[in-house]
């Protein structure tokens, strides 16, 4: 499970994957911890190459089903639905996805020959589409993932001095020391820091990324969240994280972040099964250029 949080509203989008080639999109109202399941995809969504508008009402995503006519594609939808408002065929697993530079501008991670919309799709006059970075359409989760992390307040603090690469091992690639990203608390940056440690890549019968998260307090005390798929701070300073198909919230009350064991489970998505769902009419049309945010 992976989550994107909008920059200017208390809205998140959850990618709930499982079995491995089925993905459900869920909209999260962080003010009330309510959830709106949307559409499933029979295929793969590369969630770390995706992005939300600052208001959280549109999603740019990269998906693949390895079937004709597209094999893989990038698209814009209105979460929690995946029905494409615009779709750019990709055809392979390199690049794809991109970033919302602003509500009315996207940077698409496609090569020059992959910038044409699929037949039958169009974009509104107010949306500008440009290519991402200096080598658009190449790489895998990076550069989209790392650039989005930096934009959202994460800082890369440790790069590995060595890697262990053994395709036949339980873990294909191991990093020593782990790749480490840090993000300070949004309201109390001197008090609390969240760390994301990327230990390795491709565990046999496990996740693609082996990730652990920790909380570092001002005292120097380190609390291990342990193996976890995703973690971040809410706009109000609560710690949010996912483990084993469940979402947890550790509240920050009166400037004090509680002990890790006081975390509340706010949702359990571990037992969901595929259901075919049609997008409602509103989700099949572009929103207005300007949007009044419902959840601030």
Image: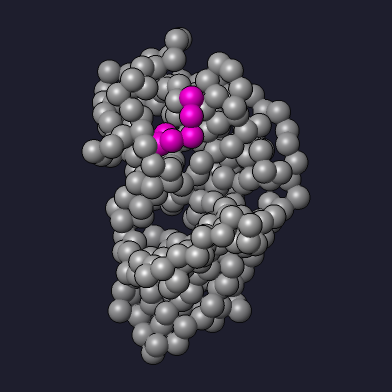
Q: Position of residue 270 (x, y in %)?
A: 71, 53
Total tally of numbered discs in the picture: 0
Q: Is residue 97 visible?
A: no
Whether residue 170 sits left or right of residue 58 in the image: it is: right
Up the image or down, 117 lies above or below 274; here it is: above
Predominant SS along the magenta part: loop
State which quadrant residue 186 falls in.
Answer: bottom left
Q: Position of residue 38 (x, y in %)?
A: 61, 36
Magenta span of residues: 91-96
State which quadrant residue 112 falls in.
Answer: top left
Up the image or down, 191 lies above or below 99; here it is: below
Considering depth in this image, is 261 or 9 the residue closer to the camera?
A: 261
Magenta stretch holds residue 17: no
Q: Position of residue 279 (x, y in %)?
A: 59, 25
The residue depicted at 54 percent of the width and 77 percent of the height is 224
Up the image or down, 279 lies above or below 188; here it is: above
Considering depth in this image, is 195 or 80 the residue closer to the camera?
A: 195
Up the image or down, 164 lies above or below 287; here it is: below
The residue depicted at 37 percent of the width and 70 percent of the height is 161
Whether residue 84 sits left or right of residue 111 in the image: it is: right
Q: Is residue 188 visible?
A: yes
Q: Position of residue 181 (x, y in %)?
A: 38, 65
Residue reaching furthest top? 120
The residue depicted at 40 percent of the width and 88 percent of the height is 220
Considering depth in this image, is 290 or 249 the residue closer to the camera?
A: 249
Residue reaching furthest left? 134
State which quadrant residue 193 falls in.
Answer: bottom left
Residue reaching furthest bottom? 219
The residue depicted at 61 percent of the width and 22 percent of the height is 67
């Amino acid at each position: 499970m992976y989550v994107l949080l909008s920059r200017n509203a208390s809205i998140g989008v959850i990618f709930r994957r499982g079995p491995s080639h089925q993905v459900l999109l869920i909209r999260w109202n962080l003010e009330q911890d309510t959830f709106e399941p949307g559409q499933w995809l029979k295929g793969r969504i590369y969630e770390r190459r995706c992005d939300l508008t600052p208001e959280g009402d549109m999603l740019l995503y990269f998906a693949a089903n390895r079937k004709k006519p597209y094999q893989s594609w990038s698209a814009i939808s209105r979460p929690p639905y995946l029905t494409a408002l615009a779709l750019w065929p990709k055809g392979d697993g390199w690049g794809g996805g991109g970033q919302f530079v602003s509500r009315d501008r996207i940077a698409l991670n496609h090569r020059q020959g992959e910038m044409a919309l699929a037949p039958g799709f169009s974009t509104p006059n107010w949306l500008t589409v440009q290519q991402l970075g200096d080598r658009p359409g190449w790489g895998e989760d990076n550069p989209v993932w790392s650039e989005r992390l930096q934009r959202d307040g994460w800082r890369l603090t440790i790069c590995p001095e060595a890697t262990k690469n053994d395709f036949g091992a339980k873990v294909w690639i191991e990093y020593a020391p782990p790749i480490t990203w840090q993000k300070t608390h949004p309201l109390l940056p001197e008090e609390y820091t969240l760390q994301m440690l990327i230990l390795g890549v491709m565990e046999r019968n496990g996740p693609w990324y082996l990730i652990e998260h920790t909380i570092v307090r001002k005292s120097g005390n380190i609390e291990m969240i342990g193996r976890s798929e995703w973690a971040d701070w809410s706009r109000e300073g609560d710690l949010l994280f996912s483990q084993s198909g469940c979402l947890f919230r550790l509240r920050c009350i009166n400037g004090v972040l509680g002990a890790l064991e006081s975390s509340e489970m706010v949702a359990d998505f571990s037992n969901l099964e595929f259901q075919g769902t049609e997008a409602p009419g509103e989700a099949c049309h572009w929103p207005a250029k300007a949007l009044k945010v419902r959840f601030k």
